[in-house]
Image (tube, rainbow, N blue to C red):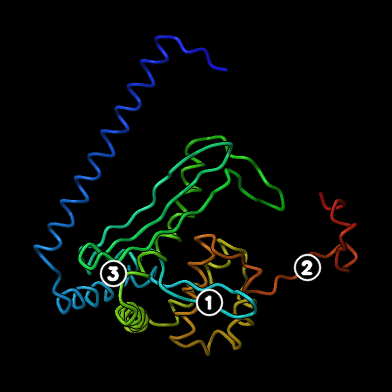
């Protein structure tokens, strides 16, 4: 049991006062934001035009979509970057990720999005263990920066879901289609050059060969279309953001022994 000294009591009292001050300030900020939203409501037509204009930027369109496998099917949709751009252009949307508690190697997190005009709110509570899996092993995280990066990464996905829950679905669908159109027509360089650079990125960053990419798409590189490029961009972003592994998309050849036969589970130690 902790011995309550006058110094400890003073420190706890100061901590409580700081917490109460922060809560009071946040409450005032929320109240002011609601009043401003009611006073200056969004013009939905102008907001929609701003969203479409933002989706014409190639830099946004490149990071706007993701794709990953689930249950034998391909799941795709708007990324957190596109969700944030939509919320910013739509206006009067408050969203974020908050750490509620950190205890015993676990962070209790809350992601939220709130339409200040309609009072529509979506909240997700989730838990993040301070550990990371790599090469089949789980490692505990002790560094504050590593823990922050882990919670921020997982929190971004929940924040995306919250934002998309309060934005009208037809607006989101229109933004996605606009980004796809931008990826097809917004580049100045030829499709062949873009595909060549994409395949090079797969090879250098994820050790995915051209043959693996061709098998995934279902045809030779020479026959790739704009739609195939858009699909590869989504896969590349999912791999880069850690939402999926390369094995989820591509057939990775098994390593072979010196005799040319595939290694089985008992032979793995022989390669080390």
Of the pair 270 and 197, the residue shown nearer to us: 270
Q: Which mark is residue 208?
A: none
At horizontal 40% and vertical 11% (from top left) the residue drawn is 7
Q: Taking the image as drawn, is residue 188 in sight?
A: no
Secondary structure state at the residue bearing disc 1: strand
Q: Which mark is residue 75?
A: 1
At horizontal 30% and vertical 29% (from top left) the residue drawn is 18
The Cα–Cα distance between marks 3 and 1, rounded to whole angstroms, is 20 Å
Q: Which of marks 3 and 2 is in front?
A: 3
At horizontal 78% and vertical 68% (from top left) the residue drawn is 254
Secondary structure state at the residue bearing disc 3: helix
- Which comes sooner in the sequence, label 2 or label 1? 1
Horizontal side, residue 193 vs residue 2: left or right: left
- Is 17 placed above or below 225 here? above
10 Å crowding of disc 2: few (<14), some (14-19), many (20+): few
The Cα–Cα distance between marks 3 and 2, rounded to whole angstroms, is 43 Å
At horizontal 34% and vertical 79% (from top left) the residue drawn is 169
- Which comes sooner in the sequence, label 3 or label 1? 1
10 Å crowding of disc 1: few (<14), some (14-19), many (20+): few
Assess whether mark 1 and mark 3 are in contact (beta carbons under 8 angstroms).
no
Q: Which mark is residue 86?
A: 3
Assess whether mark 1 and mark 2 are in contact (beta carbons under 8 angstroms).
no
Picture quarter containing residue 184? bottom left
Total number of numbered labels? 3
Residue identifier under label 2: 254
- Which comes sooner in the sequence, label 3 or label 2? 3
Secondary structure state at the residue bearing disc 2: loop
Residue 232 at what x, y percent from top left? 50, 76
């Amino acid at each position: 049991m902790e011995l309550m000294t006058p110094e400890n009591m003073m420190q706890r009292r100061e901590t409580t006062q700081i917490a109460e001050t922060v809560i009071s300030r946040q409450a005032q900020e929320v109240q002011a934001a609601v009043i401003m939203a009611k006073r200056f409501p969004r013009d939905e037509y102008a907001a929609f035009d701003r969203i479409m204009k933002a989706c014409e930027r190639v830099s946004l369109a490149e990071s706007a979509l993701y794709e990953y496998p689930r249950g034998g099917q391909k799941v795709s949709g708007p990324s957190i970057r596109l969700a944030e751009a939509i919320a910013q252009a739509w206006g009067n949307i408050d969203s974020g990720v908050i750490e509620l508690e950190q205890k015993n190697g676990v962070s209790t997190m809350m992601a939220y999005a709130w339409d200040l005009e309609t009072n529509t709110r979506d909240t997700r509570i989730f838990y993040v263990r301070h550990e990371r899996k790599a090469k089949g092993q789980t490692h505990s995280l002790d560094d504050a920066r590593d823990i922050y990066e882990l919670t921020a990464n997982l929190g971004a996905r929940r924040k995306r879901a919250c934002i998309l829950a309060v934005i009208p679905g037809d607006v989101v669908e229109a933004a996605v289609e606009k980004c796809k159109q931008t990826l097809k027509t917004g580049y100045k360089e030829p499709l062949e050059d873009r595909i060549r650079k994409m395949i090079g990125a797969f090879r250098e960053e994820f050790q995915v060969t051209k043959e693996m990419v061709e098998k995934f798409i279902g045809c030779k590189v020479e026959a790739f279309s704009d739609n195939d490029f858009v699909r590869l961009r989504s896969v590349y972003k999912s791999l880069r953001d850690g939402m999926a592994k390369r094995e989820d998309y591509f057939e990775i050849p098994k390593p072979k022994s010196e005799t040319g036969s595939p290694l089985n589970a008992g032979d793995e130690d022989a390669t080390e």
